[in-house]
Every structure is written in C-alpha cells, then in structure tokens.
Image (cartoon, rainbow, N blue to C red):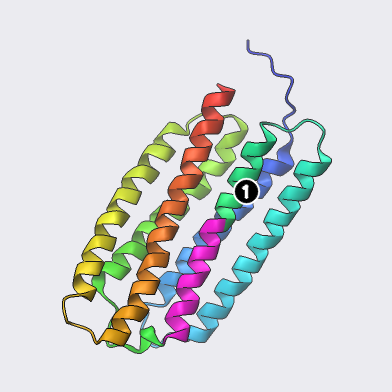
Amino acid sequence: MKFSFRPTEGAFYELFTRAAQNLVRGTELLNELALPGVDVQSVSDRLTDVEHDSDEITHTLYKKINSTFITPFDREDIYSLGSQLDDVMDHLEAVGNLLYLYGLTELPSLPREMHELVNVLDQQAKITADAMPKLRSMKGLEEYWIEINRLENDGDRAYRMLLVRLFSGEYDALTVLKMKEVADELEAACDAFEHVANTVETITVKES
C-alpha cells in the first residue's frame, strides 16, 4: 500500500469543485443568450455575479495555500489550477458582456459557428466540473483530459469556420470587428479549459 505524508485536506478540492461548477453556470448563461426574447442585460449581469463569486473562490484558495503548512499536492500546482479555472470564467464573462455591449444579440441571428463554440464550452464545463472531485483520489481522470483535448480541437475547427464566415462579406465591417472580438474570447475560453486539463494531468502524473 502506498503511503503519503500529504494530508487529505478537503477544502482545496471543495474550492476547485465550486470554481468548476461556476463555469457550468457561466456556459448555461451564454446559452440563454440564444433564446428568443431573452433579457440580455439580465444575463450579462448574472454572468458578472458568477464571475465575482469565482474571484472570491480564487482569493479564498490563495489564502488557504498561504495558511496551510502541508498541502495535498504542490503549492505551485494548486495556485496554477485555481488561477486557470478563474481565467476560464473571465473569458466567459467577457463573451457575455461583449455580446450585450455591442448589441450583437439584436442581429436576426448569430452565426451558427458561434453557437457551436458555446456548445463546445458547455461540454468542457460539465466535464471539468465532473472531474474536479476526482482530484481527491487522483483516479479516473485520464478520460477527462483526453476528452477536453478533443473538444478543444472541435472548438478550433468551429473558430476557423467562424472566421471564414465573418470575412465572407455576409456582415458589414463594423459587425465583423465586433464579432471577431467575441470569437477570440470564445476560442480563448476553449484553450483555457485545455490549460486546466493539462495542469490536472501534470498533478496526476506527479502524484501517481
């Protein structure tokens, strides 16, 4: 039987889980923006609330790192994972805010590829939320980072096709500039989910 001097401090795992659950709330709110007659300002405000809660979770995590003598795994990895989860939430909030501030939801319809990117993010968020509690045992995580990588590839393809559509002449120049900024945030969120998964893989390998 493997013996470890590291404690099974539950607070860190709970904070990671809460942060990941906020990402699910974030992608669910982005999906609401596609609904007919949606109150866009309300969605944007709720996204900001979720982002603020994620910031609080991250600050609590940092305080916990500094006040814990022996952490469940490397402090640098705990800090990195917490920071990367927060980065994802920042990108999700940026998408919602830009869609609202630029008035893009008032278009007859958003590009199909933009909805595909949000769908990829929704899947990544749910898989990440399912994975975080497994950090406690460090078991059953390989499928998680493999699937996140596959979804990130799907997101890259949707992003490239979105760019093709934006520069096809279908939209006026100002709308293209606005939607390109949203597209970049969506793609950055997909990448950020992969960074989280890569860090989880690194932690798992170190602890195995």
Q: Where is 31 relative to 174, above or below?
A: above
Q: Which residues are magenta?
A: 87-102
Image quadrant occupied by the N terminus? top right
Percent position of residue 43, x then y: 51, 79
In this figure, which residue is indicated by the disc labeled 1? Answer: 82
Residue 76: x %, y % from top left: 65, 38
Left or right: residue 48 compared with residue 170: right
Q: Is residue 174 left or right of residue 168?
A: right
Could you tell me which residue is drawn at 72 percent across and 30 percent down?
Answer: 8
Q: Residue at x 47, y 39 (%)?
A: 198
Does residue 116 appear to the left or right of 41 in the view shown? Answer: left
Q: SS at mark 1?
A: helix
Q: Residue at x 27, y 85 (%)?
A: 173
Residue 71 higher or lower than 128, as above or below: above
Is residue 74 in sight in this rendering? yes
Residue drawn at x 60%, y 67% as measured from the top left:
50
The quarter in which the C terminus is drawn is top right
